[in-house]
Image (cartoon, rainbow, N blue to C red):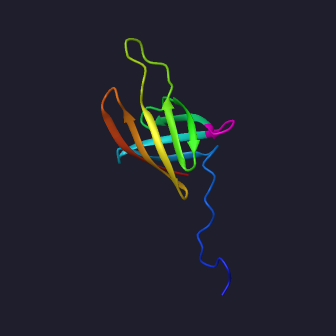
Amino acid sequence: MLLNDGDSPPAERIYGQVLHGTLAGNTAITLLIEKRDGNNIGGNYFYDRFRTPIALSGTLTGQLLELKESSEPKPGQPESDATLRLTRSGNELRGQWASKATNKQFDVRLAP
């Protein structure tokens, strides 16, 4: 018997690569995140249907990524307060998208 025989392969890096997944189970999204200095992270995501980039900035604490939307609001609309709270599980990111302003919360799932 060999040591590590049958172990799963090491987790892929999530930084600097395109991740695809869903929001609310059926809305296709694409995400790119980058590690910055310290525990700061940033990136962009978009709804595949619209392809309009939404800027993100936030922090990484252990396996938890907390990202806030930081895109410019459209004229006459308030600034977004939406956040993504994602936990790394192997090669996947899973968590929630939430907005206090709209009182909505949706599951998010992403992978390379």
Magenta range is 34-40
Q: Quadrant of residue 91?
A: bottom right
Q: Is residue 15 above or below residue 67?
A: below
Which of 86/49 is in front? Answer: 86
Q: Does residue 5 sit above or below 17 in this rendering?
A: below
Q: How many numbered marks are there? A: 0
Question: Among all residues in the image, which is located at the extreme left?
Answer: 103
Q: Residue at x 63, y 52 (%)?
A: 13
Task: Residue at the far top: name it.
Answer: 76
Is residue 8 toward the left or the right of residue 2 in the image?
left
Instruction: Identify the residue at horizontal 40%, vertical 43% (top origin).
Output: 96
Q: Say whether residue 105 is left or right of residue 33.
A: left
Residue 35 shown in magenta = yes
* Residue at 41% over, 12% down: 75
Picture coordinates of residue 20 (x, y %)? 50, 47
Quick check: is 30 in the magenta stretch? Answer: no
Quarter occupied by the N terminus: bottom right
Q: Position of residue 78 (x, y in %)?
A: 39, 17
Residue 83 in the image: state x and y as whole percent. 44, 34
* Left or right: 109, with 15 as reference point: left
Q: Farthest residue in the front direction?
A: 61
Residue 54 placed where, x, y %?
50, 29
Q: Quadrant of residue 60?
A: top right
Tell me the residue at 65%/76% (across/down). Answer: 4
